[in-house]
Amino acid sequence: MTELTLSWVLNQLNQNRKVALASVVSTSGSVPGKEGARLALTDLEIHGTVGGAGLEMKVISALKEMLSTAMKPCGEVVTYGLNKGAKGYEVKPLDSLCGGRVTVALEVLIPMPHILLMGGGHCAKAIAEACIPLNWKYSVQDSRADYASIDGAVETHHSCPRDFLMAEDSNTLSRFSDILLLGHDWKEDEERLLGLLFAGYKGRLGVIGSTAKWSAFTRVALEAGITQEKLDEVNCPIGLSIGAESPEEIAIAVLAEIISNHKGINL
């Protein structure tokens, strides 16, 4: 059961979902869960068990609260006394007749970024190379065959923006923590932007380009029915303002910005 739960956790992280995990680290007396028992959950599912009954209800409640607020990895260790009269500042009493104690490690795991590079040109390649030492995942989409494949990419999509987006929805797109529009053709980036916003992509969306380019995109998007609120969530231009000019410098600026967002740091 423990192996299955841990495998499930890794699968959820690979799908870019935050996971809250509870692990029984020690027990004494009569208890429902044994050492090594694990329970994990996302905002959609629960997997595994720490023994059931009131203990499990308390653990699930604690994990859900942690999951709802965590922006970075965090955790705590809690000891539950399985009877009404359990005392001590270090023990949380439960309405139980078991009489034992269970110590549980609670933690939130945050998936590492998985960036979709929509447009596989010089900046995309530089960003991909900069991802490697960070152990971040990246994928690429481009309508040009020669640019639709970058070494080390998890996914490669040689397709026009329309065909790619027709095969996706908000749920499938959620595997990407970040989508960057880096196209050589502003018309393709415009099509990508509208398609992603209409699809309901909820991750971090960024567009490379000037203020003039973004003004033109904004006008077209508003005319198409996209709300200003949705457009305000899009980041353009991308990257920290550090005077970056070369593709390699732009990659550093872009990844530094993603790091700050990933860790919940406002710069």
Image (cartoon, helix red, strand yellow):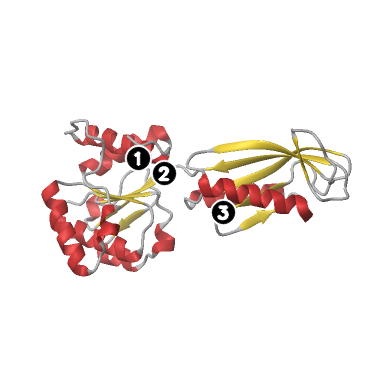
**Residue of label 2:** 113
Q: CA distance from mark 2 to mark 1?
A: 8 Å
Q: Position of residue 86 (x, y in %)?
A: 83, 40
Secondary element at image label 2: loop
**Residue of label 3:** 42
Q: CA distance from mark 3 to mark 1?
A: 23 Å
Q: Quadrant of residue 225?
A: bottom left
Q: Is residue 161 visible?
A: yes
Mark 3 or 2: in front is 3
| Of 98 and 120, the residue lying toward us | 98
**Residue of label 1:** 258
Q: Amino acid at mark 2?
A: Pro
**Residue ID at (60%, 51%):** 64
Q: Residues within 10 Å of mark 2 (few under 14, many from 20)?
A: many
Q: Residues within 10 Å of mark 3 (few under 14, many from 20)?
A: many
Secondary element at image label 3: loop
| Of 130 and 213, the residue lying toward us | 213
Q: Position of residue 223 (x, y in %)?
A: 17, 68
Q: Amino acid at mark 1?
A: Ile
Q: Quadrant of the C terminus?
A: top left
232 versus 22 height, above or below: below
Q: Are marks 2 and 1 in contact (CB under 8 Å)?
A: yes
